[in-house]
Image (spheres, rainbow, N blue to C red):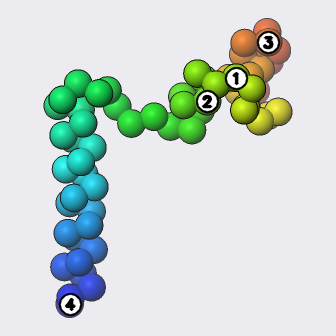
């Protein structure tokens, strides 16, 4: 029972932190691809963002 309460507390803190960031105007959390969009040299060869900017097929 203690593990369930601890898990709920951790999830609540994580959700609260994300929502607090949204309320304070930081924008949504970045996914790996959206974070890599600002750093083109670290993209994988099969990254859809890399192929899209190079003019290749997206699938």
Q: Quadrant of residue 46?
A: top right
In the picture shown, does residue 34 fall above or below 31? above
Q: Position of residue 59 (x, y in %)?
A: 76, 27
Name the residue: 28% across, 55% down: 14
Query: Which residue is at 77% across, 36% downward?
Result: 44
Gap between marks 1 and 3, in whole Å? 11 Å
Tell me what residue is drawn at x 27 percent, y 85 percent.
3
Is 40 left or right of 35, judged from the image as shown? right
Q: Is residue 27 found left or right of 23 in the rendered image?
A: right
Q: Are marks 1 and 4 in contact (CB under 8 Å)?
A: no
Whether residues under marks 4 and 3 lie with C-beta atoms below 8 angstroms apart, the answer is no
Instruction: Please name which of the two marks, 2 or 3, marks the residue nearer to the observer.
Output: 2
Characterize the local packing of mark 4: few (<14), some (14-19) or many (20 or more) Cα atoms within 10 angstroms. few
Nearer-N-terminus badge (1/3): 1
Residue 34, given in percent of the width and then of the height, sits at 54, 28
Mark seen at residue 1: 4
Q: Earlier in the sequence, mark 4 or mark 3?
A: 4
Q: Earlier in the sequence, mark 2 or mark 3?
A: 2
Alpha carbon distance from label 2 to label 3: 15 Å
Tag of residue 54 = 3
Assign the N terminus to one quadrant of the image.
bottom left
Which quadrant of the figure has residue 54? top right
Label 4 to label 3, Cα distance in Å? 53 Å
Q: Which callout, 1 or 4, points at the residue further toward the start of the chain?
A: 4
Q: Which residue is mark 1?
A: 40
What residue did someone put label 2 on? 36
Label 2: state its secondary structure: helix
Residue 5 in sight here: yes
Q: Are marks 1 and 2 in contact (CB under 8 Å)?
A: yes
Which image quadrant for residue 49?
top right
Nearer the camera: disc 2 or disc 4: 2
Q: Is residue 49 above or below residue 4?
A: above
């Amino acid at each position: 029972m203690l593990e369930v309460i601890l898990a709920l507390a951790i999830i609540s803190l994580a959700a609260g932190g994300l929502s607090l960031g949204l309320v304070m105007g930081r924008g949504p959390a970045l996914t790996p691809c959206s974070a890599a969009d600002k750093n083109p040299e670290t993209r994988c060869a099969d990254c859809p963002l890399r192929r899209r900017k190079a003019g290749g097929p997206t699938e």
